[in-house]
C-alpha cells in the first residue's frame, strides 16, 4: 500500500523521502546535544524533527502534499537560521541542503522567496561569520548551489510535464486519452458528491467512419479525426473536457449544465459538425448520446447510460442527439 501510493504520487514520494532523510539526519544531533548538555540546540533539533514528522503525517493522512511541503520548508528554513544563530559557522552547513530542498518541494517563485529570506537574514544578522570575506565566500557558494538547484528543479518539472502529457494525451488529436478521461470523470463524480456541481457526459461517434477510411485511406481518416476534435474544442468552453475514447469515438465532459442546457449544447455540436466537417467533398456527421450525472452513480454506470443513448441515436438514423435523463432515453 505504501509503495503503491509513492509510485503513483510523485509529490508524496518526494515529501516522504525528504522528510525521512531529514529526520534521520537531524535526530542523532538532537541526541548528541542532549548528551553533551547543549539543551537549547537539542530542543531546536527536536522541534525541527517533530515539525517535519507532523508535516509528513499530514501528507499521508490528507493527501495534501503542497501544504505539507510548505510547512516542511518553513520549518527547515527557520531551523537553518536558528542553527546558524546558535552554533555559528558550524550551523551554516545546513544552509546548502535547505536551499536544495526549497527548490525541490516548492514552486520556483516560492522557493526563490524562501531562499532569499534565509540568505538575507543570515547576511543581516552576520554573527555566524568572522569576517566579511567569510560572508562573501558563503554568499557566492550558496548562490551557486541555489542556481543549480533552480536549474535542476526547473528541468525536472519540465520533463515531468512532458511525460504527463504523453501519458494523458492522444498523440493524433491532442484530446485527452482514456486514462485522462477516467481521472477527470472520477474527479467530477467526487465534486458532484461534495458540492452537487452538475455534469453532463456526451459520447460522440462519427457516422460511417469506416467508409471514410475504406474510400479515401487512413491518412484522410486521421485528418477527419483531427478536424473533428479541433471543431469541438473551438465550440466548447474552457472548462469543458474532450477525450478520445478510441477509434472514431470521443467523449465530452460538460460541467455546470442541467438537462435542457446540456441538450442544447450537444445539439449545437451535432449541427456544427454537419455544416463544417468535410472529407474532400463529402459531409461528415456525428451521433451523440448524453447523460447527466446522477446521485450515487459511478463512472462505468454514467458512461453506460450515455452509450445507451448513443446507440439509440444511431438506431434512430444517426446525425442526431439523445440524452438519457435517468428514466430512459429522451
Image: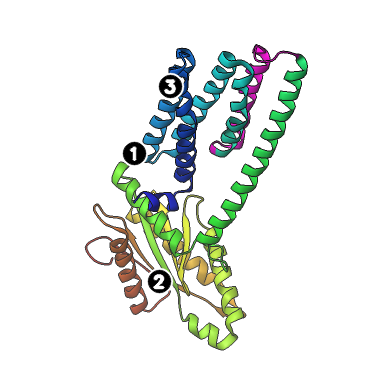
Which element carries disc 1, helix, strand or loop? helix
Where does the magenta region start and end?
A: 105-131
Q: Nearer the viewer, residue 7 or 36?
A: 36
What is the spatial separation of the Cα atoms under label 1 and label 2, in whole angstroms?
A: 48 Å
Can the viewer see residue 276?
no
Residue at the front extreme of this rendering: 36
Q: Is residue 258 above or below residue 90?
A: below
Which residue is under mark 3?
A: 47
Quadrant of the image occupied by residue 220: bottom right
Q: Earlier in the sequence, mark 1 or mark 2?
A: 1
Which residue is rendered at x = 34% and y = 39% of the image?
61
Q: On the rendered image, what quadrant is the C terminus found in? A: bottom left
Which residue is under mark 2?
A: 320
Q: Is residue 216 above or below residue 179?
A: below
Q: Earlier in the sequence, mark 3 or mark 1?
A: 3
Is residue 128 inside the magenta stretch? yes
Which element carries disc 2, helix, strand or loop? loop
Which residue is rendered at x = 65% and y = 47% of the image?
155
Which residue is under mark 1?
A: 61
Q: Is residue 88 left or right of residue 17?
A: right
Which residue is rendered at x = 46% and y = 28% of the image?
28
Q: Nearer the viewer, residue 86 or 178?
A: 86
Amino acid at each position: 500500500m505504501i509503495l503503491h501510493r509513492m509510485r503513483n504520487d510523485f509529490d508524496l514520494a518526494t515529501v516522504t523521502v525528504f522528510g525521512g532523510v531529514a529526520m534521520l539526519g537531524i535526530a542523532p544531533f538532537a541526541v548528541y546535544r542532549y548528551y553533551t548538555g547543549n539543551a537549547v540546540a537539542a530542543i531546536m533539533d527536536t522541534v525541527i524533527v517533530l515539525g517535519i514528522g507532523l508535516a509528513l503525517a499530514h501528507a499521508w493522512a490528507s493527501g495534501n502534499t503542497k501544504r505539507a511541503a510548505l510547512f516542511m520548508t518553513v520549518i527547515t528554513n527557520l531551523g537553518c537560521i536558528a542553527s546558524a544563530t546558535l552554533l555559528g559557522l558550524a550551523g551554516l552547513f545546513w544552509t546548502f541542503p535547505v536551499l536544495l530542498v526549497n527548490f525541490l518541494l516548492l514552486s520556483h517563485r516560492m522557493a526563490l522567496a524562501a531562499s532569499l529570506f534565509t540568505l538575507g537574514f543570515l547576511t543581516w544578522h552576520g554573527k555566524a561569520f568572522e569576517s566579511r570575506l567569510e560572508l562573501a565566500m558563503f554568499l557566492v557558494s550558496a548562490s551557486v548551489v541555489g542556481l543549480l538547484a533552480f536549474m535542476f528543479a526547473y528541468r525536472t518539472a519540465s520533463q515531468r510535464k512532458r511525460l504527463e502529457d504523453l501519458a494523458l494525451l492522444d498523440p493524433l488529436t491532442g484530446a485527452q486519452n482514456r486514462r485522462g478521461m477516467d481521472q477527470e470523470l472520477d474527479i467530477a463524480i467526487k465534486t458532484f458528491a461534495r458540492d452537487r456541481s452538475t455534469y453532463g457526459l456526451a459520447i460522440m461517434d462519427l457516422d460511417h467512419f469506416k467508409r471514410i477510411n475504406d474510400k479515401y485511406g487512413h491518412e484522410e481518416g486521421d485528418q477527419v479525426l483531427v478536424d473533428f476534435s479541433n471543431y469541438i474544442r473551438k465550440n466548447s468552453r474552457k472548462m469543458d473536457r474532450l477525450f478520445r475514447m478510441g477509434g472514431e469515438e470521443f467523449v465530452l465532459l460538460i460541467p455546470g449544465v442541467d438537462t435542457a442546457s446540456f441538450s442544447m449544447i450537444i445539439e449545437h455540436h451535432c449541427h456544427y459538425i454537419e455544416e463544417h466537417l468535410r472529407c474532400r467533398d463529402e459531409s461528415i456527421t456525428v451521433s451523440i448520446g448524453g447523460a447527466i450525472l446522477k446521485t450515487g452513480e459511478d463512472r462505468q454506470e454514467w458512461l453506460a447510460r450515455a452509450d445507451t443513448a448513443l446507440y439509440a441515436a444511431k438506431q434512430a438514423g444517426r446525425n442526431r442527439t439523445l440524452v438519457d435523463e435517468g428514466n430512459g432515453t429522451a
